[in-house]
Image (tube, rainbow, N blue to C red):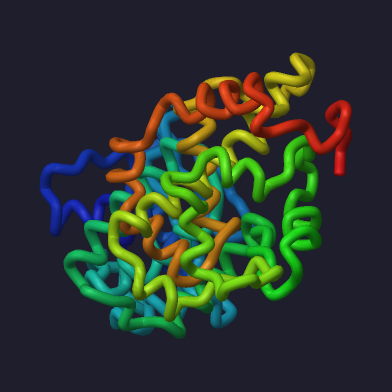
Amino acid sequence: MLIIGSHALRIYDSSRSVKDIDIIGTRREIEKFIEKLDGSHTIEYKEHAALVRRDKKLIYELFYAENNNSFESYLMLEDAHDTYELKIAGLATLFSIKKSHIYFPTNLPKFEKHLKDYLLLLSMVGKDNLLGYTAKHQKFNEKIRGKRLRTPKLNKDSYKFFKESSGPVQYTFIHDELHDVMSHGDKPRYTLMQKENSTSAFCYESLWNEMSNQHKLEAVLEEAYVIALERHLIPKMYNENFETSFGNPMLAFKWALMRICTNLCSGFFREFAQLNYFHLVNTFNINYAKKFEEALAEGRIKPAKGKLVKS
């Protein structure tokens, strides 16, 4: 049996607190483990795991390694198969499992905990040395949690891209015009990643690599400001009954940045945002919403539609 998660990571980082213990094992191993528990525990059986609680508090999460699933692959990799002894997973395995979770949007506290663990493990291992295992476990996570939304394709004209990627967003202002208002310079930083006079939303990694670190940070900030405005602050400003949005600029920004780090962006842009998430949270301009309101009051930006309607 194999211990994973925060309890395993505690071996490498003794300062961290642990709420419950995650263990991978075969069904037979898990059944034997449960048999040894005293009567104060309650067991909840799920398709992929057994949850053990005491006084309603989760104590163990026991994951079934079976049918060639990713848990079984990790168990075999760590030579922890067909043994009732508990073994601590190695750093490469812990990083692979954590990386497979990092692309799923969730609540902010949980996302930030995952990201802290991810960055800590990355500093220890340097890179993912188990890419095949990671991909397999990510697919297994999708089976359990439901498929995450795919990142939008960029190789289409800007208007079509932003209209299609808006989904349930209540579309009021032109996305590019919001970028103009949030810009740190004469032009939004994302334009530094695009070829001159391009009408496509596609961004080139080669041009990104030529940008300074400060310009990269500003590019992510601008994108997060715009997403926060589009998906939370503007709907709240224009429609008090739009209950799925919140009007707190800090929460809206952090939510938008989380989405950039998970499934709204991909590739080099997403990776940079992940690596710099906490720096961005500590340095962003809390007055970005006021900047938008001032531009609106001065007529530098106008609604694309007379009222909010679902796109």
Looking at the picture, how far across and down is residue 138, in whole percent? Answer: 53, 69
Frontmost residue, 247 versus 48: 247
Q: Residue at x 37, y 40 (%)?
A: 59
Residue found 79% across the figure and 54% down from its top: 163
Nearer the observer, 111 or 8: 111
Image quadrant holding the C terminus, namely: top right
Q: Residue at x 59, y 79 (%)?
A: 67
Q: Where does the image place residue 89, in percent across and percent down from the top left?
A: 26, 68
Left or right: residue 71 compared with residue 233: left
* Residue 164 drawn at (x, y percent): 79, 57
Left or right, 165 with reference to 141: right
Does residue 273 sit above or below 294 in this rendering? below
Compared to residue 126, the image places residue 235 above or below, namely above
Q: Is residue 127 left or right of residue 169?
A: left
- Residue 181 vs residue 260, the one in the foreground: 181
The tally of labels here is 0
For the point 31% across and 82% down, the residue is 129
Q: Nearer the viewer, residue 137 or 219?
A: 219
Question: Which quadrant holds residue 139?
Answer: bottom right
In which quadrant of the rendered view does residue 233 lie?
A: top right
Taking 6 as reference, is 168 left or right? Answer: right
Quarter of the picture holding the N terminus: bottom left
Whether residue 133 is visible here, answered yes or no, is yes
- Of all residues, the one furthest to the top in this rendering is 240
